[in-house]
Image: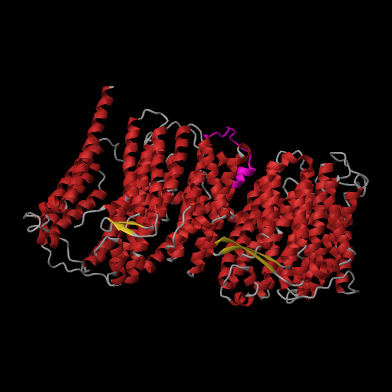
């Protein structure tokens, strides 16, 4: 199993090297890998259809208790088959389509890595591994678009799509971590059975919202559907297909996968049901409005994704059966149609439905398969799309609580889908032949293989719906529901309400198509209202983030050191004040009685000096005041019988003042730029900070300290140091090595100063 | 009083050897006439290599206290020093390339760098506040000087001045805090402090004040909001060669400081400092990610990115569990690797007299050099926390620990800010891959440089695919599991 997932990556990294060496056969040869995988996965059908779930585990990150565990049940098998099966045709197709392009090798690198990531995603049982593959699909498919991007608009909004999916991915990560907390495991195999615990957990709502944020962004659900159009700028319809029809299914997959764990609640029903239905409607509306071949197809994919989300949300037996059937039907016809779109582009050089017509005679086979696939899209009997659509109507009609709303949405959407299908299936092929850039020819086998097989399968499954239904789809439905479901698919359900709805939508749809040349421009004019849509919201949010960021830079990060210091001091002040206020409401009342009056005089002089230093406009005055302050402090030292410290202070103070005065001569004249407002603010902060520090000091004096170290020196300087001057004994005896170090440092500094002076003297000479 | 013995010197052998060799490198540089400073550079790298060998030879889970308990050699210090050596080695290689491109080759870049490394080593092994302060100042002074190396550039001088002024204030706060802790516990020895703190709750008052000052000091060194303001100006003002060093390796030392002071020393006060770290972490992630968006200069942007990563790192520490510390260590190491890679690419983009550090300079890089574009892509995705790159595991490990201690809202906030942050990393990816190149000058770069930048990218990718070894080391450090190397 590990090899099955990783083989894609291995071949991917060899691809750039192999591609030029294999020449024309490259597509067919590379196609062997997904084909082999398809066969290998298909061999599991009997086992899985019997309801078994297979687990494969490999150690990966033991430190975080993460194993690379793969889980194979009906749902993952269905996806794995679709990915490897359609992947085979895509790889073959690209071999011809991109032949001779310089970037074909890198294209294969990315497309194979993408395929392997998708496989890993749908097979992973470990949530973390799943997330890793999830993001890998985003990255690889974005890099796929990165090649050959000629459209300017697409370039401009490429960031948008990437950001929306990556952002959603991070939300998903948070959701998955919470899910693991709630469910007590990172393994899906265990989570799938602990749904009741998770649904009752206090974290259920946040984790559900986060996970849905991830899946909705990935699967382009309303209101995040806006990023998908940019995917249409992809170089080839192939990568457009991968991106807008395959990668986006990952979100649907995850919702289906987690249905047994998270589903069945009212929140789940409302969120998925309503958002899915809205997306479905918007998707088909946008598809009807567009004229670009890739646009129409991609928007119709949005419709399909919405439908699937809605069905998973409804969650009844019918709905889940409909969901898996619809998933299969959609994959078959959409794969065929995207490849046909590529053929049209390749053969005619035209990308717009309005410029296409009458190609039937030039490319009859392509036209035939396009017609079959389009019939399935429209949901017309006897195609498999019809089976799926009937089931969908049945499911929405029976849906609890929101049945009426979503039925209305579904019918409206179905009408438009019929029209879209007609645009795709009829318009390019019938009618008068329109001029093309190149002379169209029938497509070669490597291009036609995919559409032929996929479209035919759509027809075959339609005629014999139990063929996929009996084994694969029932197992898939079982996996989604978490309990056995009786899946019964048939083409003919009798005359009932769903059939009536189908017939109505068919009639209205054809009417819409008949008037397409009028309806489409009319709808396109509605584009003027798009600015009210969610894309605008995205832009506004982004713009406001940028403006917050800008204003922060201007206000706070303005380059002025004084503001930086101000911020640091204010923060510290806040933290200290908060500590004092929350813990010690009683302010200290220090005992000042023992302090002599002349001490207060010195203190007052010191304070006045400080006040003068900050208010004066003369630099010299400020320096002198600072000097006075220093000498005041020295005097206090002396008064408290620390004469030596006092002398040191006097020396340092003198040198500082002299140096400051010397430096001041070299500075330009003093100019006062500060506004009185900011001076007031600075003064306020300074007073507050000084006050807080004073308060802290007063508080600390009340605390009983440990016995001072001086006791030791007083006791021992005589007996041990043989000296009576304790300070001297400390310096030359107890701390002799410190003193030595100090002397060393001073000597070193002196040498440095000497060297600098000498250098300067030499500079002058030369 | 006991004189230090062989055991003490053995425990500190790496520091002693690096200090000695650093002095020798200084002399080599003085007597060397080589314009390319190849000998100085080789001697510097040799010093680091000797350091690595010494660490590995003595690697063990035993805890040895040396020099009267002022110094500790444990598995945390060993592993930190190993990463410091490796990070510094890579940084010096990038540095040399930068200096060569810009014709500014000076030996002092490497000697100052070595002394900074020495300072970090001392920090990592400090078990006494004075040792810690000594290491911090050795590191800081070397960095101040490095930032100011381009003496003729007003921008560099301004950056150095700001860095120095604010750094001095921060050091002052730290010392003030330490003196208060001393006042409350009667010791500066971190072990004794821890014992005293665990017993004496009555002296809460001074302890908390001391704690506030110490946290502020650490926050400055880490560059956490609101003590971050030096970072953008210094990152932009310093030569890229210095920025790439300053922005990456010293974060390991800052982490060491955090662990030694808050966990080893003030661990019993976890309830008190957890709240402060939460504030710092949330602010850092918010401001770092939000403000990075408006930056046009990549180095400034990376400065804010660093700030946001620091927020994440703090998340791991504030969880207060061994797993949380391990996640934070892992995050720091991963951040260092990513930061080095991103700056390495920037160095390669520059040319004589031209710093490629505006967003427009990397436009269309994919057309000019797909390989370099690939490396930058890996770095940006990794920094944004997108798997399968290394940065994802770092974020994931931290988030998991935060959730594990019940701070779910904090984890969600962290993710929200990461989402905002993803925007500017992805914007770079978009510029590289989707925009037309404005610059057409070919990208050169010496072959060692190309090899190193490529391996840097590969490391982020390969360790991203197989994070177990690196993560295993970080976890082993804190769970004291026997480490097996080789």
- Quarter residue B241 falls in: top left
Residue A666, placed above or below residue A3: above
Camera-side residue of A200 and B378:
B378
Give the residues drawn in magenta, as a range: B429-446
In the rendered image, residue A695, in percent from the top left (x then y), is placed at 26, 64
Camera-side residue of A440 and A282:
A440
User: Residue sitting at 50 percent across and 61 percent down?
Assistant: B398
In the rendered image, residue A222, in percent from the top left (x then y), is placed at 69, 62
Residue B310, placed above or below residue B152: below
Question: Along the horizontal axis of the image, is B453 left or right of B13?
Answer: right
Give the tally of numbered discs: 0
- Is residue B126 visible in the rendered image? The answer is yes
Which part of the image, by quadrant, shows the N terminus of chain B?
bottom left
In the rendered image, residue A349, in percent from the top left (x then y), is placed at 81, 42
User: Residue sitting at 33 percent across and 30 percent down?
Assistant: B31
- Is residue A686 visible in the rendered image? The answer is no
Camera-side residue of A151 and A386:
A386
Question: Along the horizontal axis of the image, is A135 left or right of A484?
Answer: left
A608 is within the stretch colored magenta: no
Question: Along the horizontal axis of the image, is B250 left or right of B207?
Answer: right
Magenta stretch, overall SS: loop
B445 is within the stretch colored magenta: yes
Q: Which colour scheme is used?
A: secondary structure
In the rendered image, residue A313, in percent from the top left (x then y), is placed at 71, 70
């Amino acid at each position: 199993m590990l090899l099955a997932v990783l083989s894609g990556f291995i071949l991917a990294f060899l691809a750039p090297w192999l591609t030029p060496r294999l020449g024309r056969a490259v597509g067919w040869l590379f196609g062997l890998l997904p084909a082999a995988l398809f066969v290998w996965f298909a061999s599991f059908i009997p086992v899985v259809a019997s309801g078994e779930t297979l687990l494969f585990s490999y150690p990966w990150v033991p430190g975080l208790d993460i194993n690379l565990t793969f889980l194979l049940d009906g749902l993952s098998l269905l996806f794995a088959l679709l990915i490897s099966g359609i992947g085979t045709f895509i790889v073959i197709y690209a071999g011809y389509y991109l032949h001779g392009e310089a970037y074909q090798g890198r294209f294969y690198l990315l497309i194979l890595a993408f395929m392997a990531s998708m496989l890993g995603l749908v097979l992973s049982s470990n949530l973390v591994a799943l997330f890793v593959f999830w993001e890998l699909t985003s990255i690889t498919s974005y890099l796929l678009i990165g090649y050959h991007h000629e459209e300017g608009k697409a370039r401009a909004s490429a960031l948008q799509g990437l950001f929306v999916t990556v952002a959603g991915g991070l939300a998903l990560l948070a959701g998955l971590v919470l899910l693991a907390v709630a469910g007590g495991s990172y393994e899906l195999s265990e989570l799938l059975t602990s749904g009741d615990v998770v649904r009752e957990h206090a974290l259920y709502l946040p984790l559900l919202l986060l996970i849905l944020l991830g899946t909705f962004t990935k699967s382009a659900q309303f209101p995040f559907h806006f990023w998908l159009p940019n995917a249409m700028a992809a170089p080839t319809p192939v990568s457009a297909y991968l991106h807008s029809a395959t990668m986006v299914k990952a979100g649907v997959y995850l919702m289906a996968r987690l249905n047994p764990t998270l589903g069945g609640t009212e929140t789940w029903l409302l969120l998925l049901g309503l958002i899915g239905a809205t997306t479905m409607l918007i998707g088909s509306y946008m598809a009807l409005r567009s004229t670009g071949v890739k646009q129409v197809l991609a928007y119709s994919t949005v419709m399909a994704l919405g439908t699937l989300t809605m069905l998973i949300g409804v969650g009844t037996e019918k709905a889940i059966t409909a969901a898996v059937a619809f998933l299969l039907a959609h994959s078959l016809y959409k794969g065929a149609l995207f490849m046909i779109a590529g053929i049209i582009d390749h053969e005619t050089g035209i990308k717009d439905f309005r410029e296409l017509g009458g190609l039937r005679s030039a490319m009859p086979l392509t036209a035939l398969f396009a017609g079959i696939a389009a019939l399935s899209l429209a949901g017309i009997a006897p195609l498999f799309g019809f089976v799926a659509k009937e089931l969908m109507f049945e499911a929405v009609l029976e849906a609890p609580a929101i049945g009426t709303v979503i039925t209305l949405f579904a019918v409206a959407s179905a009408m438009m889908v019929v029209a879209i299908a007609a645009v795709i299936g009829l318009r390019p092929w019938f009618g008068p032949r329109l001029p093309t850039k190149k002379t169209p020819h029938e497509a070669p086998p490597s291009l036609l293989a995919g559409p032929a097989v996929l479209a035919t399968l759509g027809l075959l499954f339609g005629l014999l719906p139990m063929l996929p239904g009996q084994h694969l789809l029932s197992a898939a439905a079982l996996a989604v529901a978490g309990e056995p479901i009786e899946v019964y698919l048939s083409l003919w359900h009798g005359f009932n309400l769903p059939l009536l709805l189908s017939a109505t939508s068919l009639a209205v749809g054809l009417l819409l198509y008949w008037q397409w040349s009028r309806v489409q421009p009319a709808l396109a004019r509605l584009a003027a209202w798009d600015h009210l849509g969610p894309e605008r919201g995205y832009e506004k949010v982004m713009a406001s983030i940028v403006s917050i960021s800008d204003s922060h830079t201007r206000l706070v990060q303005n380059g002025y050191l004084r503001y930086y210091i101000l911020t640091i001091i204010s923060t510290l002040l806040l933290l200290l004040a908060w500590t004092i206020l929350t813990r010690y409401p009683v302010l200290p009342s220090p005992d000042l009685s023992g302090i002599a009056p002349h001490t207060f005089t010195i203190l007052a002089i010191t304070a006045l000096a400080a006040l003068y230093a900050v208010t004066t406009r003369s630099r010299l005055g400020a320096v002198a005041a600072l000097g006075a302050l220093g000498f005041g402090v020295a005097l206090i030292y002396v008064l408290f019988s620390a004469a030596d410290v006092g002398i040191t202070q006097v020396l340092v103070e003198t040198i500082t003042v002299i140096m400051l005065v010397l430096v001041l001569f070299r500075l330009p004249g003093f100019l006062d730029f500060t506004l009185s407002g900011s001076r007031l603010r600075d003064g306020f902060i300074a007073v507050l900070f000084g006050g807080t520090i004073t308060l802290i000091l007063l508080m600390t004096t009340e605390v009983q300290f440990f016995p001072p170290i001086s006791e030791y020196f007083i006791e021992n300087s005589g007996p041990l140091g043989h000296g009576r001057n304790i300070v001297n004994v400390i310096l030359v005896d107890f701390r002799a090595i410190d003193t030595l170090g100090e002397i060393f440092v001073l000597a070193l500094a002196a040498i440095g100063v000497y060297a600098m002076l000498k250098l300067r003297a030499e500079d002058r000479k030369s | 009083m006991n004189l230090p013995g062989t055991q003490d010197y053995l425990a500190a052998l790496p520091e002693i050897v690096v200090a000695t060799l650093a002095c020798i490198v200084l002399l080599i540089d003085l007597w060397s006439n080589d314009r390319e400073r190849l000998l100085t550079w080789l001697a510097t790298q040799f010093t680091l290599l000797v350091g690595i060998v010494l660490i590995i030879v003595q690697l063990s889970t035993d805890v040895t206290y040396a020099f009267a308990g002022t110094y500790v050699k444990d598995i945390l210090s060993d592993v930190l020093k190993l990463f410091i050596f490796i990070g510094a080695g890579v940084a010096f290689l990038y540095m040399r390339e930068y200096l060569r491109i810009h014709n500014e080759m000076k030996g002092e870049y490497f000697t100052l760098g070595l002394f900074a490394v020495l300072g970090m080593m001392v920090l990592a092994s400090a078990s006494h506040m004075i040792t810690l302060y000594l290491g911090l100042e050795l590191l800081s002074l070397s960095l101040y000087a490095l930032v100011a190396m381009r003496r003729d550039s007003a921008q560099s001088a301004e950056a150095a001045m700001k860095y120095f002024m604010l750094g001095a204030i921060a050091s002052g706060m730290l010392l003030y805090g330490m003196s208060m802790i001393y006042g409350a516990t009667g010791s500066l020895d971190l072990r004794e402090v821890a014992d005293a703190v665990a017993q004496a709750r009555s002296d809460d008052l001074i302890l908390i004040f001391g704690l506030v000052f110490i946290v502020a000091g650490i926050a400055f060194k880490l560059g956490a909001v609101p003590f971050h303001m030096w970072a953008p100006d210094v990152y932009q003002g310093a030569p890229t060669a210095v920025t790439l060093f300053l922005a990456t390796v010293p974060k390991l030392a800052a982490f060491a400081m955090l662990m030694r002071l808050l966990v080893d020393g003030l661990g019993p006060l976890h309830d008190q400092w957890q709240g402060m770290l939460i504030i710092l972490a949330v602010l850092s992630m918010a401001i770092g990610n939000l403000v990075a968006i408006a930056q046009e200069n990549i180095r400034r942007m990376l400065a804010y990115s660093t700030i946001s990563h620091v927020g994440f790192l703090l998340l791991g520490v504030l969880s207060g569990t061994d797993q949380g510390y391990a996640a934070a260590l892992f995050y720091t190491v991963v951040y260092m690797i990513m930061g080095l890679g991103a700056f390495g690419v920037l160095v390669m983009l520059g040319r004589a007299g031209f710093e490629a550090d505006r967003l427009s300079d990397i436009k269309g890089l994919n057309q000019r050099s797909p390989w370099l574009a690939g490396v930058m892509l890996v770095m940006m995705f990794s920094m944004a926390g997108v798997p399968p790159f290394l940065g994802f595991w770092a974020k994931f490990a931290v988030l998991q620990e935060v959730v594990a201690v019940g701070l779910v809202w904090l984890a969600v906030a962290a993710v929200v800010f990461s989402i905002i942050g993803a925007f500017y990393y992805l914007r770079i990816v978009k510029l590289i891959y989707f925009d037309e190149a404005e610059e057409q000058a070919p990208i050169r770069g010496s072959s060692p440089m190309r090899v190193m930048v490529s391996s840097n990218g590969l490391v982020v990718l390969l360790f991203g695919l197989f994070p177990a070894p690196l993560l295993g080391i970080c976890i082993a450090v804190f769970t004291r599991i026997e480490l097996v190397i080789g």
